[in-house]
Image: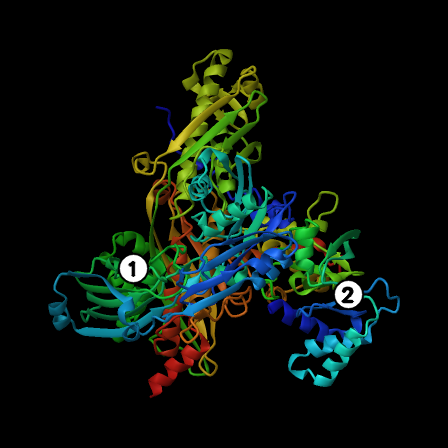
Amino acid sequence: MPDYSWPPMEKRRAIGKPVKRADGLAKSTGRAKFPSDLNPPGLLFGYLLTSPHAHARVTSIDTSEAEKLPGVTAIRVINGAGKELQWAGQEIASIAATSEPVALDAARKIKIEYDILPHMVDEQDLSQVGSRAKPAGEVTTGDPEKAFQEADVVCEGSYGIPVITHCCLESHGQVVEWKGDTVNYWPSTQNVSALGAELARAIKVPVTQVHTDMQYMGGGFGSKFPSDLWGSECAELSKASGGRPVKLFLDRAQELKIAGNRPSVYGDIKLGAKKDGTFTVWQSKTWATGGMGGGNLNADQMPYVFRGVPNRKINHTAVSINTGSARAWRAPNNQQLSYITCSALEDLAAKLDMDALDFFLKNVDLTSRPEVYKYQLEKAAELMGWKKLAHKRGEGGSGHMRRGLGIGVNMWGGLGHDSTCRAIINPDGTVAVELGSQDLGVGTRTCIGQVAAETFGLPVSAVTVNIGRDSYPPSGASGGSTTIGGVSASTRKATVNALAKLFEVVAPALGTTPENLEAADGRIQVKGNGSKGLAWKAACAKLGVNKIQEEGKNVGRTAPREGLISQGAAGVQMADVSVDIETGRVKLNKLVAVQDCGLVVNPRLAESQVFGACIMSTCAALMEERVMDQQIGRVLNADMEFYKLSGIADIGDIVVHLDIRPEMDKRGVIGLGEPPAIGGIAAIGNAVANAIGVRVPQVPVTPDKVLGALAGRKA
Amino acid sequence: MIRFERICLNLCANPPRLDTISIDPKGRKEVSAVKDPKDPKGFSRRGFLRGVGIGSGALTTGILQTEADAAETSGGSQLSGPGEVPITLTINGKAMKTSVEPRMTLLDTLRNKLDHTAAKRVCDRGTCGACTVIMNGKVVYACSVLAIDAQGKQIQTLEGLSQNGKPHPVSQAFLDHDAQQCGYCTPGFVMATKDFLDHHPHPTEEQVKHGLGGNFCRCGTYMGIRKAALQAAQAMGGKNA
């Protein structure tokens, strides 16, 4: 078998280098065409008519007036008379027209009558949800009751982390052209290779008739895996309009209501410790919602990261409510678990009168990777200036501005999804790699090019990277931080295989055998003898008229044995905040992120990932939440004025430390998309508690909640 | 409704700029500002009254409304809309002809009619900045400008920023500092940065944070954008001020 292993650190020429984003200029000059930018000839505009009611039955629907409107080419009823609608925003009808204004006019002319049914959209108070609550598991390990009796300190608290939405800037949608036996499909997706098959099933055509293409996409974060109802509707509208292409993207309000969300978690936590800070017992009663499907949480993972605590009692309840369904949200479950766990742990530390950092270090043996977390906690503390800035809870100053520090931790799996790469070496010396993968903006395209360039000994710019089409060999969906593992392993194997073929052709000309050749610095040469060789182009010319085309596969299941990629990431976030106790406003001064991530293919892009993850955490900790109104059953902030994201001035300084020590590098490539998005929320919440002396029990930590918590303490 | 409110705001904010205000004779709610090609004086009292009547919402008076209605039924000057009307926009120095419904925004016209898709539609109501373009030397949210209102103005979009195939220093700086991930907010940010630097050639980082506060990014690229803006300022050397 060929040697696929990564070259040693000191010999790398392309991987591990801060190569600039391959498609960066296309994006920053406006040349990049996203699916929502496409204007194929004859384009029609689609629109979805959705339910204004959280729970209702359609009693009648009349589209006749709308159909008469000039410019309307198709109207389809999705949920007609007799159908029950389960949330505000659920699809009722779809429309295609020659312009957007006409499509909107048509939607207004559709007459619908409803039977309004009772709804439930608020899960915060478990006692109010009635039959919507379903037990979702109870676990007991050790002897929690005895442990509480024996604990020197017992701490109880209630915590909450609300539903947030993905708020992808490019909303969900696609352009579809269904003409005769051909369905051209341009979706905004995280799942290029498999999406066509899903659409084909939905619209009942053979998969071979669907052709998927996506070169750019405007954010997914876990919400863009399926082809969705609006995908098949878009196709059907195209067919019904004589095969003209239709563009159907959700409007912003729809995007925030129905395109996925991160489930909430609320809970009452009780935990205990010995006087010396040894954490001995965890008890949690939590509930959550992710819409009509309820809100399951892998509650057995609590306490998060510190799962080795000997005594645990865990109880979880799933609550179904009349809202759009949850979808994977960058590190599903983990943000909630980290927030609930780290908040409770820091409250326990405060009650022990112990420094939070000392407390986490004291209990590091309860984690699955003690030496890694110890290193990271100490590194983060150093970068934060923890020793100098740390103080006891509530001693954050005497004026109206109070300062505090907090900690959050993360863990993640990674590994790599199934991926096949096709590497091509042409007789003219040009090279290409082809994968049915996708670049969500994380830099996948750039990293693939680096891996190929490394193998071929060529500059990164010499490699053509073709992704985003289902005509290329299949790659998995981009989820679970498995993309970089999958595509780097498959690309490495494919390029090594292709190079071996080139060596076979070139070896005789150099009077040696293939195994004595290497590719380096744009040459094919005899190992250890740079003077005996051929320039890359001259070597490829030996191919005559035949190109080399070889494949390489990463199989997720067997990959760990091969050493190219690995799983298991850990990280620590620390936050430094200032809180104005008169206005309740929280200002983030600094966020430190220390992350292990194995072999880093591109440190520039990896750092960007961690920056982005930290900024997302800042949004979730301080601003972001979906607000439901139980009276009317609707999302009150389905827009971007009141669905708050951080702006450029709202984040403080962010310090990223990627742990690329040789022992970490040896583990191989590990995905980095999700883990750094986990711990920041808890870190910021904890820093606020440290600053003002009381716990603000729910995020986002908005001024009203800060003032409320402070008032509660006085009361 | 959203669009209606926006149009009203537009009307109330800039009444002197209106040449005519046309009414949808079928009584739909959209109110539009359009230059009537057949009326050289370009101003219709009847339309203006009706426009004020609707546009000022709670301030509507019955008298104005009645007068407008009376004027309308007595026939008279040419109405524009509700169908498409021909317009000419000056985009990146080039006159471009198209036809739009008077209620169509500059953003939708750029994207759907003129295939200028760098400006993105994200919030579609003047919050996120993804549709930022420069109009007569000032940044505007193209989702909050009516296409018919943009006639006669110099409109600069990201497509027009590169010169002779060379990327603008701001575009280059966004690459150099990896100030982008998915890239959907990037065109708006590049235009906002360009305009900011045109007016603040030597900014501090604090000024950058303030000056680019009108744009949102979801991937979290602000760290790179801060550095990119400062690099671009140096590269532009205050030349464009």
Indicate the position of residue B241 as horizontal and vertical percent values. Answer: 75, 61
Indicate the position of residue A178 as horizontal and vertical percent values. Answer: 54, 40
Indicate the position of residue B152 as horizontal and vertical percent values. Answer: 81, 61
Outermost right residue = B40
Is B158 situated left or right of B41 in this image?
A: left
Q: Quadrant of residue A66?
A: bottom right
Count the numbered circles shown.
2
Outermost bottom residue = A715
Q: Which mark is residue A557?
A: none
Separation of disc 1 and disc 2 at Cα?
56 Å
Q: Quadrant of residue A426?
A: top right
The chain identifier of the residue carrying mark 2 reads B
Judging by the rendered image, the residue that carries numbered circle 1 is: A297
Q: Secondary structure at mark 1?
A: loop
Where A495 sits versus B43, above or below? above
The chain identifier of the residue carrying mark 1 reads A
Q: Nearer the viewer, residue A101 or A310?
A: A101
Where A396 sits versus A10, above or below? below
**Observer able to see residue A509:** yes
| Marks 1,2: beta carbons within 8 A | no
Q: Label 2 crowding class (10 Å Cα cut-off): few <14, some 14-19, many 20+? A: many
Q: Nearer the viewer, residue A192 or B183?
A: A192
Is A97 situated left or right of A682 in this image?
A: right
Q: Which amino acid, mark 1?
A: Leu
Q: Label 1 crowding class (10 Å Cα cut-off): few <14, some 14-19, many 20+? A: many
Q: Nearer the viewer, residue A360 or B187?
A: B187
Q: Which amino acid, mark 2?
A: Val
**Observer able to see residue B226:** no
Q: How is the image coloured?
A: rainbow
Q: Which mark is residue B34?
A: 2
